[in-house]
């Protein structure tokens, strides 16, 4: 009889493994992604791609996805989100606390705790300044929230606590309110060579309608992108706008918003 290894091994939980590696261009979990995008600039299309397009996170990356948006039931672009995830059209602190309490139930067994995404789309007008979201913005990592996505049409409507804790940002275009854009430049421009240089970066990244400036604020130096496709600047240093990310990193996360994305519900 051939010798075989019959050593009794210790029983242990296998590590959680994702079905596919995440494109390094995207916000890396745990991440607070803040989207500032005026009306009719393709915000819902971006969110749908992030959560349903397999080139991005896709429908299987997170164990659970919760979407809260006042337009979730009447926005045609969001119809696949409604079919795939737990969706609500009204924000309340109690609703979000309930989600967090569900996560806290796994405190004694973190291995089995779901890794979730929480999307809060255009709900800033529904919340109070002392909202539970301010607590969540600084503590979301502790609750197994791998992606906390908050969006607003107005930057100044977002609380300073949320703004200071965001790890990445998307700024849509066209941006009709120069004061709002100036406020963003004033607050984070120092990371990109000053407010004036930040505005130049923004306009370089958004030459066409539906383009957006994507900021990776976790990198050192922070990186500014044209959409999810090309690097515009490293901090305050301009980069080659035409350099495709596909040549730098495995896989290319691209988004063409000129038409409705070809996303199908599973």
Image (tube, helix red, strand yellow):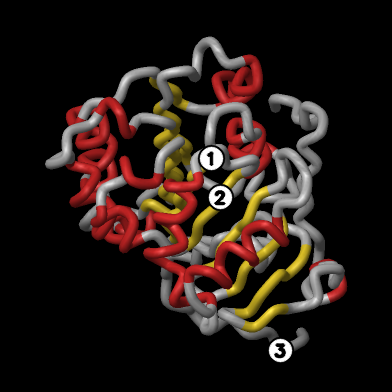
Separation of marks 3 and 2 at Cα, in angstroms: 63 Å
Q: Quadrant of the N terminus?
A: bottom right
In-image side of 238 versus 62 (left or right): right
- 168 or 262: which is nearer to us? 168
Task: Please rate how many residues cluster around mark 1, counting C-alpha atoms within 10 Å: few if below 14, some from 14 to 19, many from 20.
Answer: many
Give the mark, 1 or 3, whose residue is nearer the N terminus: 3
Instruction: Name the mark on residue 171.
Output: 2
| Nearer to us: label 3 or label 2 | 2
Give the mark, 2 or 1, whose residue is nearer the N terminus: 1
Q: Is residue 42 above or below residue 170?
A: above
Q: Quadrant of the C terminus?
A: top right
The residue lying at 87 percent from left, 73 percent from top is 247
Can residue 59 be seen in the rendering of this structure? Answer: no
Measured from the top left, where is residue 133 in percent x and y? 24, 44
The residue lying at 32 percent from left, 34 percent from top is 124
Which element type, helix, strand or loop, lies under badge 3?
Answer: loop
Measured from the top left, where is residue 229 in percent x and y? 77, 60
- 93 or 130: which is nearer to us? 130
Task: Please rate how many residues cluster around mark 2, counting C-alpha atoms within 10 Å: few if below 14, some from 14 to 19, many from 20.
Answer: many
Q: Which residue is mark 1?
A: 37
| Nearer to us: label 1 or label 3 | 1
Task: Please rate how many residues cluster around mark 3, counting C-alpha atoms within 10 Å: few if below 14, some from 14 to 19, many from 20.
Answer: few
The quarter of the displayed image where residue 78 is located = top right
In-image side of 232 versus 35 (left or right): right
Separation of marks 2 and 1 at Cα, in angstroms: 6 Å
Separation of marks 1 and 3 at Cα, in angstroms: 66 Å
Can residue 216 be seen in the rendering of this structure? Answer: yes
Measured from the top left, where is residue 3 in percent x and y? 71, 89
Which element type, helix, strand or loop, lies under badge 2?
Answer: strand
Give the mark, 3 or 2, whose residue is nearer the N terminus: 3
Q: Which residue is mark 3?
A: 3
The residue lying at 49 percent from left, 44 percent from top is 36
């Amino acid at each position: 009889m051939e010798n075989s290894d019959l050593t009794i091994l210790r029983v242990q939980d296998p590590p959680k493994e994702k079905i596919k590696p995440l494109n390094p261009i995207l916000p890396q979990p745990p991440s607070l992604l803040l989207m500032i995008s005026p009306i009719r600039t393709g915000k819902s299309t971006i969110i749908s791609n992030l959560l349903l397009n397999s080139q991005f996170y896709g429908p299987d990356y997170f164990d659970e996805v919760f979407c809260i948006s006042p337009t979730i039931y009447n926005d045609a672009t969001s119809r696949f989100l409604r079919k795939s995830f737990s969706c609500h059209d009204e924000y309340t602190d109690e609703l979000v606390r309930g989600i967090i309490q569900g996560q806290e139930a796994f405190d004694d067994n973190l291995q089995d705790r779901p890794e979730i995404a929480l999307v809060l789309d255009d709900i800033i007008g529904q919340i109070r300044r002392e909202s539970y979201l301010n607590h969540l913005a600084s503590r979301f990592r502790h609750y197994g929230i791998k992606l906390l996505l908050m969006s607003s049409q107005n930057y100044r409507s977002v609380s300073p606590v949320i703004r200071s804790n965001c790890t990445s940002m998307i700024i849509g275009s066209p941006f009709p309110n120069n004061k709002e854009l100036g406020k963003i430049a004033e607050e984070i421009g120092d990371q990109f060579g000053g407010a004036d240089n930040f505005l130049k970066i923004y306009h370089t990244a958004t030459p066409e309608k539906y383009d957006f400036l994507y900021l990776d604020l976790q990198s050192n130096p922070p990186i500014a992108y044209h959409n999810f496709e090309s690097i515009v600047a490293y901090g305050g240093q301009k980069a080659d706008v035409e350099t495709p990310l596909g040549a730098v990193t495995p896989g290319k996360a691209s988004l063409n918003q000129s038409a409705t994305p070809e996303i199908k519900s599973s």
